[in-house]
C-alpha cells in the first residue's frame, strides 16, 4: 500500500518562508549547556563556548542541516532551572556569531523564556521553539506575535522536576491526551495573535511520557495531521529508544540498563524514518548527516 501524501505548507518565519512537505527538513541540535542528557558540555566551556559551538554549527550546516536549534537550558529530567539572564549569556554570543558568519542560515532558539526569545530573535533567530508550548511563560505568545517569528509549540506533561512522579499512561490514553493539549496551545497562540501560517507543532516525545508511553505517539503520528499544521518530531537519542534496545539485547530481563545516548544512532534513524513516513515535516537531531541520508530515502518513498 503506498504511503499517504505528506501535507505541504509554506511556513512563514520572521524574514523568510520555508517550504515544507516536499522534502524533510533537518533541524540540528546545538546545546550550549553543561548538563544536557546527550551532549552536555560538548559545546559549552566558558572559556571557548563561542568558538566550539560555532564550529559545530558550521559542521552541521555542511552535513545538511536546514535549521539550527540553539538552546542554553537543559530540560532533561531533574534539570536545574536557569535564569533567563544566564541562558542569554550562553546562547546570544553563539547566535550572533553564526548569524554574522552565515546570514543565510535559519536559526531557531530553544527557550521557554519570553525575554530570551525576544533577544535571540533580535540577534538573528527566525524561530522560537518552546518546549512548554507557551505554558511556562505567559508572555511568550504575545512576544512571538509581536516579533513575527516562526513558533514551534511542543506538548509537555508537567515540568522536568515532575516527570518521575507522574502517574503512568495507558497506551490508548497517550495520543488523545497530547492531541487535546496541543489543541489548547494552538488555540491560545492564535488568540494571542500568532497567525496559523507561523505555527508548527511537536508532540513532545519524552516530555512527560515515560519510556514505552512514547510509542503510541509514533504509531499514531498521522492523527496530528488534523491540525493542518507542520509537524516537528524530536526523538534523537531519547531514553525510550535506549530502553527498547536494552530489552532487545537481553530478552527475558525485566530490569535493564538503557544503552548510552551516543549509542542510539540506529534507533534514532529508525524512529525518524517512521515519523517521516507518517507525515513529519521536520526532524530534530544530534547527528545531521545520518538523518539527512535516511530522510532522503523516506522522502523518495513519499513521492510514489
Image: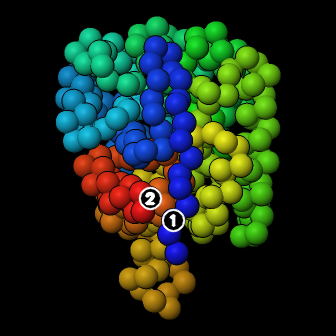
Q: Are marks 1 and 2 in contact (CB under 8 Å)?
A: yes
Give the class, few, some or many, for how many residues have Cα within 10 Å of label 2's Cα (few <14, many ≥20). many
Q: Which residue has dot 2 on it?
A: 302
Residue 164 is left or right of residue 84, and the answer is right
From this view, report whether residue 102 is shown above or below residue 175.
above
Query: Hey, which quadrant is residue 102 in on the image?
Result: top left
Q: Residue at x 50, y 16 (%)?
A: 14
| Residue 61 horizontal/vertical position (percent) | 25, 34
| Residue 84 horizontal/vertical position (percent) | 54, 18
The C terminus: image quadrant: bottom left
Identify the secondary structure beneath mark 1.
Answer: loop
Q: Which residue has dot 1 on it?
A: 3
Q: Residue at x 73, y 17 (%)?
A: 193
Q: Is residue 269 visible?
A: yes
| Residue 150 horizontal/vertical position (percent) | 55, 24
Q: Residue at x 64, y 9 (%)?
A: 146
Give the class, few, some or many, for how many residues have Cα within 10 Å of label 1's Cα (few <14, many ≥20). few
Q: Distance from label 1 to label 2 (Cα)?
A: 6 Å
From this view, report whether residue 278 is shown above or below residue 132.
below
Residue 124's mark? none
Query: Hey, which quadrant is residue 82 in on the image?
Result: top right
Q: Nearer the viewer, residue 98 or 302?
A: 302
Query: Hey, which quadrant is residue 198 in on the image?
Result: top right
Q: Nearer the viewer, residue 162 or 123?
A: 123
Q: Is residue 128 visible?
A: no
How many numbered badges does the structure rendering display? 2
Q: Residue at x 72, y 59 (%)?
A: 175
Q: How is the image coloured?
A: rainbow
Residue 153 is left or right of residue 64, and the answer is right
Which comes sooner in the sequence, label 1 or label 2? 1
Identify the secondary structure beneath mark 2.
Answer: loop
In the displayed orientation, state which residue is furthest to the front: 304
Amino acid at each position: 500500500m503506498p504511503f499517504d501524501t505528506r501535507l505541504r505548507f509554506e511556513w512563514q518565519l520572521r524574514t523568510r518562508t520555508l517550504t515544507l512537505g516536499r522534502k524533510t527538513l533537518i533541524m540540528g541540535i546545538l546545546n550550549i549547556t553543561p548538563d544536557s542528557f546527550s551532549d552536555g558540555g560538548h559545546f559549552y566551556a566558558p572559556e571557548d563556548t563561542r568558538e566550539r559551538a560555532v564550529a559545530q554549527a558550521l559542521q552541521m550546516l555542511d552535513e545538511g542541516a536546514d535549521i539550527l536549534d540553539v538552546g542554553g537550558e537543559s530540560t532533561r529530567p531533574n534539570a536545574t532551572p536557569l535564569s533567563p539572564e544566564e541562558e542569554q549569556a550562553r546562547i546570544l554570543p553563539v547566535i550572533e556569531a553564526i548569524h554574522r558568519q552565515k546570514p543565510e542560515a535559519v536559526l531557531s532558539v530553544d527557550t521557554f523564556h519570553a525575554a530570551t526569545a525576544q533577544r535571540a530573535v533580535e540577534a538573528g533567530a527566525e524561530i522560537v521553539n518552546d518546549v512548554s508550548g507557551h505554558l511556562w511563560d505567559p508572555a511568550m505568545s504575545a512576544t512571538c506575535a509581536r516579533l513575527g517569528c516562526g513558533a514551534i509549540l511542543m506538548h509537555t506533561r508537567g515540568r522536568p522536576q515532575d516527570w518521575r512522579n507522574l502517574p503512568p499512561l495507558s497506551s490508548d490514553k497517550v495520543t488523545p491526551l497530547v492531541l487535546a493539549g496541543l489543541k489548547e496551545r494552538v488555540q491560545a497562540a492564535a488568540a494571542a495573535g500568532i497567525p496559523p501560517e507561523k505555527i508548527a507543532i511537536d508532540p513532545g516525545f519524552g516530555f512527560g511520557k515515560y519510556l514505552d508511553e512514547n510509542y503510541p505517539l509514533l504509531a499514531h503520528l498521522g492523527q496530528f495531521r488534523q491540525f493542518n499544521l507542520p509537524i516537528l518530531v524530536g526523538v534523537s537519542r531519547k531514553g525510550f529508544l535506549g530502553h527498547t534496545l536494552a530489552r532487545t539485547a537481553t530478552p527475558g530481563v525485566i530490569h535493564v540498563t538503557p544503552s548510552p545516548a551516543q549509542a542510539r544512532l540506529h534507533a534514532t534513524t529508525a524512529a525518524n524514518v517512521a515519523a517521516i513516513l507518517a507525515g513529519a515535516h521536520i526532524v530534530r537531531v544530534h547527528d545531521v548527516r545520518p538523518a539527512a541520508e535516511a530522510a532522503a530515502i523516506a522522502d523518495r518513498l513519499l513521492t510514489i
